Image (tube, rainbow, N blue to C red):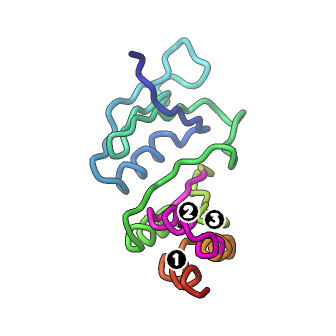
Amino acid sequence: MPGIRTSLWFDTEGEEAARFYTSLFPNSEVTGVTHYTEAGPRPVGQVLTVDFTLDGQRFTAINGGPEFTFDEAVSVLIECADQAEVDRYWAALTEGGEEGPCGWLKDRYGLSWQVVPLRLNELTSDPDPGRARRATEAMFGMKKIDVAALEAAADAG
């Protein structure tokens, strides 16, 4: 069976980003670093790739140059157990980045993340269509997801 991992293209910040990400998540580590050689196209010794895991999920960061940048078409989704986890990841990842709507953000490297409490899916897929609609409407008005506000909105009917 083939191995599958996510590859992230950076200009030059791949190692810095990998070390930042691995500092945030449990069971995470940088597992390998390669460097450019005389074969180029970047200076000899500059970091080429960084292999790392985030809570067991494998990633590779490549320092490929400025030709490609991140956009919101691809994001990393964090399923958070509770509001405390949402708050922790949101604070760390928005530092130097920017908040977006509905639990989305861009970190300091431009990578998009979705910081989502598990409770969000439960509320927005509630068997009672009114509760689901009210929770969904509340989510659309949020940046960082607020579980208590979602529950209050769902119960407001």
Q: Which residue is drawn at 42% across and 50% down?
A: 21
Q: Residue 125 carries which label?
A: 2
Looking at the image, is mark 3 or mark 2 nearer the viewer?
Answer: 2
Q: Earlier in the sequence, mark 3 or mark 2?
A: 3
Question: In the image, what residue type sits under mark 2?
Answer: Ser
Q: Is residue 88 visible?
A: yes
Q: In this view, does 108 lie to the left or right of 31?
A: right
Question: What's the magenta region?
Answer: 112-133
Q: Which residue lies furthest to the left in this view?
A: 27
Q: Which residue lies furthest to the right in this view?
A: 67
Q: Mark 1 points at which residue?
A: 146
Question: In the image, what residue type sits under mark 3?
Answer: Glu
Q: Helix, strand, or loop for circle 1?
A: loop
Q: Callout 1: 10 Å neighbours few (<14), some, many (20+)?
A: many
Q: Which residue is drawn at 68% across and 74% down?
A: 137
Q: Is residue 147 left or right of residue 40?
A: left
Residue 126 among magenta residues: yes
Question: In the image, what residue type sits under mark 1?
Answer: Asp
Q: Mark 3 points at which residue?
A: 98
Q: Callout 3: 10 Å neighbours few (<14), some, many (20+)?
A: some
Q: Callout 2: 10 Å neighbours few (<14), some, many (20+)?
A: some
Q: Which residue is drawn at 56% across and 25% down?
A: 43
- Please give the count of numbered marks on the rendered protein: 3
Q: Distance between the residues labelled 3 and 2?
A: 28 Å
- Image position, residue 85 (x, y; %): 39, 67
Q: Helix, strand, or loop for circle 3?
A: strand
Q: Residue 96 carries which label?
A: none
